Each structure stands twice: as C-alpha cells, then as structure tokens.
Image (spheres, grey):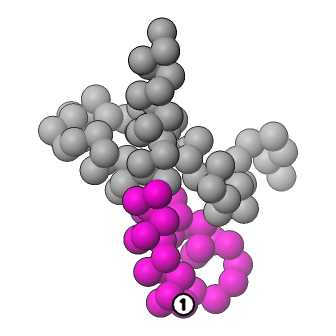
Amino acid sequence: MMEGFLTWGDLATYGGAVMAVLIITEFTKDLPGIRRLPTRLWAYLVALVLLVAAVVFGGGPIRAQDILLCLVNGVIVAMAAVGSYHAVRESN
C-alpha cells in the first residue's frame, strides 16, 4: 500500500485533482509536442485523463453520466489549477 502518496480516491476529490493537474501540467508543459499546446488546453486534457482514470479505477460501475461529468469537471479542475499557478506566480 502506498501510504502518503496520492490514491485514486484522492484524485476523485476536487483538491486532489487540482493539485495533481497543477503539478503534472507544470512538469510536462515544456515537453516536445506538448509545448505547442496552450497551457489551459493541456491542463484540461490532463484533468480529463485523471478524472476518467479515477472513475475507472475507483471500483464502481462506469456509467455514461460519470464520463459526461468528467468532461465538465475537467474544465473546473483545469481552470482552478491554471488559476492557482498564476496567482502564486504573480504574488512573487
């Protein structure tokens, strides 16, 4: 068991998803091929993958409405992650 690290349950929460998207986006946004994408779009794609994975690996049934909610929640999570980054960066 990986205690102290993120779990799929953590990624299914708002705070866990925002934190993971912020870190993964910042770490990967300058990779070849990804750097051409706008950061907001890359953050959304990362959020979408993480949220869908949290549903898939969460152990429950995978329903169409859950995937649709991932599409919407991905926008919310990505915008919060990008906004958090800009807020911290501007305060320095």
Magenta segment boundaries in residue numbering: 48-76
Q: Is residue 66 visible?
A: yes
Between residues 31 and 68, which one lies in front from this camera angle?
68
Q: Residue at left 37%, top 35%?
A: 28
Relative vertical location of residue 30 with respect to residue 55 in this rendering, above or below: above
Q: Residue at left 63%, top 56%?
A: 14
Q: Position of residue 11 (x, y in %)?
A: 63, 56
Q: Quadrant of residue 53?
A: bottom right
Q: In the image, is residue 72 part of the stretch drawn in magenta?
A: yes
Q: Position of residue 21 (x, y in %)?
A: 49, 45
Callout 1 secondary element:
loop
Q: Left or right? Give the position of 1 relative to 31.
A: right
Relative vertical location of residue 45 with respect to residue 30 in this rendering, above or below: below
Q: Left or right? Give the position of 6 relative to 28.
A: right
Q: In the image, is residue 74 part of the stretch drawn in magenta?
A: yes
The residue that mark 1 highlights is 63
Q: Main secondary structure of the magenta part?
A: helix
Q: Residue at left 84%, top 45%?
A: 3
Q: Left or right? Give the position of 44 relative to 65.
A: left
Q: Position of residue 63 (x, y in %)?
A: 54, 90
Q: Amino acid at mark 1?
A: Arg
Q: Is residue 46 visible?
A: no
Relative vertical location of residue 29 with respect to residue 60 in this rendering, above or below: above
Q: Left or right? Give the position of 10 relative to 41.
A: right
Q: Residue furthest top?
A: 92
Q: Position of residue 7 (x, y in %)?
A: 72, 54
Q: Residue furthest left?
A: 36
